[in-house]
Amino acid sequence: MSNNIKENSKYKTISEVAKILNLVNKRKKKFSTHTLRFWEKEFKQVKPKIFTGNRRYYDEKTINTLKKIKFLLKDKGMTLNGAKKVLNSEEYNIDVSHNTSINQKNIIKSKLKKIKNIIKTIASS
């Protein structure tokens, strides 16, 4: 795939996507592409175009899906199975562009649970 075609079709290489998502290997201080390959195996929604030499190219839709996966796993601390359920569910709206949670009810429930635990801790002191 020539650079000209790549620019016109808006495909990104795996290293460009790792940079976009800021996936950094903390030990090597380099962008981590192995995380993207792992997510590709785990999440059926991630389908990069694979050309000769196993070079992966990601379109905008796939990059947005990867942003959601990163948000759920890294920012929200969800498990792989939990993130899969969210991505497979139609009722959830994940808006990573505004760094909001997966639906307001979950935010409120989570905060109420934390408050409840704080109150229990204070009451038992």
Image (tube, helix red, strand yellow):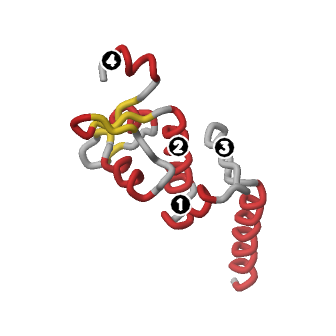
Residue 26: x %, y % from top left: 31, 48
List the single residue furthest toward the front.
52
Single out the mark in the foreground, 1 or 4: 4
List the single residue furthest toward the top.
4
Residue 36: x %, y % from top left: 38, 47
Single out the mark in the foreground, 1 or 3: 3
Residue at point 70%, 49% (across, down): 93
Please tell me whether residue 68 is drawn above or below residue 79 in the rendered image.
above
Disc 1 target residue? 77
Labelled pair 1, 4 in contact (Cβ < 8 Å):
no
Single out the mark in the foreground, 4 or 3: 4
Disc 2 target residue? 67
How dense is the environment of label 2, judged by Cα within 10 Å: few (below 14), some, or many (20 and up)?
some
Disc 4 target residue? 3
How dense is the environment of label 4, judged by Cα within 10 Å: few (below 14), some, or many (20 and up)?
few
Q: Determine whether, in the image, residue 112 is placed left or right of residue 34.
A: right
**Which of pointers 4 and 3 lies earlier in the amino acid sequence?**
4
**Which of pointers 3 and 2 lies earlier in the amino acid sequence?**
2
Q: Secondary structure at mark 1?
A: loop
Labelled pair 3, 2 in contact (Cβ < 8 Å):
no
Mark identifier at residue 60: none
Residue at point 72%, 77% (across, down): 122
